[in-house]
């Protein structure tokens, strides 16, 4: 996908990084959150018999709400409520969401289209549990620029969508949704608030800036297909989303940026700076975190891993 926005350059980009993080420095940080920047994966089902779509994360005949067969396509919708072994998915054949056993899914790639963004003149666009205008069915709030993946647009007014900020699916009035890129912006998912997880974290894939209250850096070009980040109070872990989405032991770990009042807990960590009583470190994996038999994902992971040096070179640490 072609990136439409103009890149900032040289010292100007560095200045923007510093200013960006300073403006965010007054707010509080979360303990832990996970989010992905443009990294929703789709899968095909491979099973003898059928794979049950369930309304709960347990093997129980009473919670079956549909049947999936070999070749059926599903999209993995990240959810904070997922437990090991189950994915929350949308089934294109059944046209509904539910949980499935991830052991019977084969990763096929990242969803590349059907991304929209909210556009309201004021206030917010409600994410709803039903296709009707009612205060009681509001399950989330979407603001102008918030990204969604449209799952089903058959209804003339209310579309089934998945919010990349809220990590939740529901119905939204399509009159307030705009195709991503139609106004010349956001050719990549821009995570401007992480669904309220933190007002201090911005992952802007358009201008290639990642910023929190205490660090900012320029996102390398090779990371644009999709990154997943685990955000803790004292560190951020980055992953290649394509690898992390693929079932298996590999997780696509790229690096961690973390701070400590003492020395590093990792012998292989690189010391970055000392600011406001904290030592800052960068840690990379000591082993290979992608499946070498998956040529496409392996090549993407290698490219992203090699460009961790660009993250280190552009990193700005903000004094509080």
Image: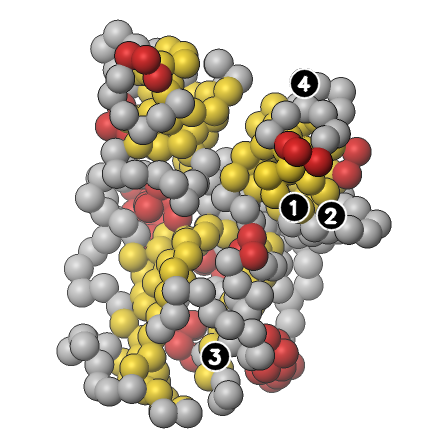
Going from N to C along the chain, the mark reached first, 1 or 3, is: 1
Q: Which residue is mark 4?
A: 154
- Gap in Å between the C-alphas at discs 1 and 4? 22 Å
Going from N to C along the chain, the mark reached first, 1 or 2, is: 2
Query: Residue 191: x percent and y percent?
Result: 57, 56
Crowding at mark 1 (Cα within 10 Å: few <14, some 14-19, many 20+): some
Vertical comparison of 52 with 252: above or below: above
Foreground disc of the pair 3, 2: 2
Front residue of 114/78: it is 78
Going from N to C along the chain, the mark reached first, 1 or 4, is: 1
Res 113 seen here: no
Residue 214's tag is 3
Query: Residue 197: x percent and y percent?
Result: 51, 58
Q: Residue 48 is drawn in which quadrant?
A: top left
Front residue of 241/230: it is 230
Vertical comparison of 196 with 183: above or below: below
């Amino acid at each position: 996908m072609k990136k439409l926005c103009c890149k900032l350059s040289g010292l100007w980009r560095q200045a923007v990084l510093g200013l960006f993080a300073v403006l965010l420095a007054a707010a509080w940080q979360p303990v832990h959150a996970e989010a992905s920047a443009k990294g929703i994966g789709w899968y095909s089902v491979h099973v003898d018999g059928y794979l049950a779509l369930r309304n709960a994360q347990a093997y129980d005949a009473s919670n079956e709400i549909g049947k999936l067969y070999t070749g059926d396509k599903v999209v993995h919708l990240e959810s904070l409520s997922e437990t090991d072994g189950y994915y929350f998915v949308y089934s294109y054949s059944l046209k509904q969401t539910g949980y499935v056993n991830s052991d019977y899914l084969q990763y096929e790639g990242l969803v590349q289209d059907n991304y929209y963004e909210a556009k309201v003149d004021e206030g917010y666009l409600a994410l709803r549990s039903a296709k009707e205008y009612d205060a009681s069915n509001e399950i989330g709030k979407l603001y102008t620029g918030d990204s969604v993946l449209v799952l089903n647009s058959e209804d003339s007014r209310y579309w089934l969508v998945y919010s990349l900020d809220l990590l939740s699916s529901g119905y939204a009035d399509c009159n307030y949704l705009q195709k991503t890129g139609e106004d010349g912006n956001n050719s990549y998912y821009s995570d401007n608030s992480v669904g309220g997880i933190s007002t201090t974290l911005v992952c802007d894939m358009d201008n290639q800036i990642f910023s929190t209250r205490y660090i900012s850096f320029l996102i390398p070009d090779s990371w644009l297909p999709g990154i997943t980040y685990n955000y803790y109070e004292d560190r951020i872990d980055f992953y290649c989303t394509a690898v992390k989405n693929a079932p298996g032991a590999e997780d696509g770990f790229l690096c961690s940026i973390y701070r400590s009042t003492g020395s590093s807990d990792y012998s292989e960590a690189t010391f970055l700076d000392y600011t406001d009583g904290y030592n800052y470190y960068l840690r990379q994996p000591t082993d290979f975190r992608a499946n070498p038999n998956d040529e496409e994902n392996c090549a993407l992971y290698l490219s992203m891993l090699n460009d961790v040096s660009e993250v280190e070179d552009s990193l700005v640490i903000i004094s509080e």
